Image: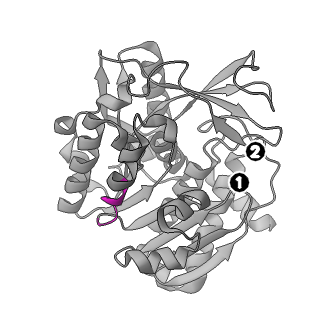
Amino acid sequence: MNNKAIANRPAKVICLGEILFDCLADELGKSVSEVTSWTSYPGGAPANVASALTKLGTSSAFIGCVGQDEPGKELVQLLQSIGVDVSGVQYTKQAPTRQVYVTRTVEGDRTFAGFGNQPADCFADAYLQSDLLPTELFLAAEYLVIGTLELAYPKSRAAVFRALELAEEYHLKIVLDVNWRSMFWLDEQEALPLIEQLWSYVDFLKLAEEEARWLFETADAGAIFYRLASVEGVLVSNGAAQVSYCLAENEGRVSPFPVQVQDTTGAGDAFLAGFIHQLCQRGIQELSNPQVAQDVVKYACAVGGLTATKSGAIAAQPSPELVQALLEKF
């Protein structure tokens, strides 16, 4: 099924949060002050997940706020062209669409380097309005995907908790990608208690290893699964190292695929999209089968790995045919 056909179906997955431009350093291995040339790529974790899902064949919607400016218009048009439902996008005159500067190591790993001397709360995504969330999207959806960046600002924080209320009211499964980025917070001390408020809502939790150690003092998915008690699945990723997972009490580890890494921006988001796509394809009840649980994580690893082989979080996302070819190769 092509993306246009997918766009005509009600969204199975709602992704709420930021959409922005990642300004990637053209020169590898240099600090932000040393870089002389940057290239802008569309990004933002929830937008990346929505885009990757649609490309894989699962209908998605994006809810977020952009500025009434050319960058915001360009980003929304991109999602539309891919087939993502953008009926939940809000526009504000109060702030511009966000740009994030990203430096890269020689190996392609990235470091977030700030917002070009602008305060973190002076961008459009901080102005997402809770009273403008489109209830009709929640009527047909099966999953809500959120991160933690929106918790950093009062207006967008209220929108997150309103979305969680709607998700519970309409029986959506809630997927949280912690996606910790300290530079988005004006006061980092506020973050931990706010993030911990999310645990009671979450059905599936994705963390990077350093996030798992910070929040739970372990990188073992099974230990986190049993500590939270109410979740149905936990995924802990660690770049090129093994993914630890616990899905419906099935625990294991999966090695990433050996790919030629060019840029890891958005690879974790693509991994999560691959995981959710498989949940939609197979059904959550199938995770009780240990082989299915492992295969779902392998698929997610393939999507994430392929995304790291090209620059740009959205531009690099693979088709289902490319994913299948990689799975058959190994």
- Position of 162 with respect to 46 (left or right) is left
Judging depth in this view, the residue of 139 and 228 nearest the camera is 228
Q: Are marks 1 and 2 in contact (CB under 8 Å)?
A: yes
Quarter holding residue 66? top left
SS class, disc 2: loop
SS class, disc 1: helix
Residue type beneath disc 2 = Thr
Was residue 199 drawn as part of the magenta stretch in this picture?
yes
Q: Residue 90: x percent and y percent?
A: 29, 28
Q: Which residues are magenta?
A: 195-200
Q: Residue 293: x percent and y percent?
A: 56, 77
Vertical placement of residue 47 versus 302, above or below: above
Q: Which residue is mark 1?
A: 305
- Position of 140 with respect to 47 (left or right) is left
Q: Which residue is mark 2?
A: 309
Was residue 266 drawn as part of the magenta stretch in this picture?
no
**Disc 2: CA contacts within 10 A as few (<14), some (14-19) or many (>=20):** some
Overall secondary structure of the magenta stretch?
Answer: loop
- Position of 104 with respect to 164 (left or right) is right
Q: Residue at x 19, y 35 (%)?
A: 132
Q: Residue furthest front?
A: 189
**Disc 1: CA contacts within 10 A as few (<14), some (14-19) or many (>=20):** many
Vertical placement of residue 155 versus 230, above or below: above
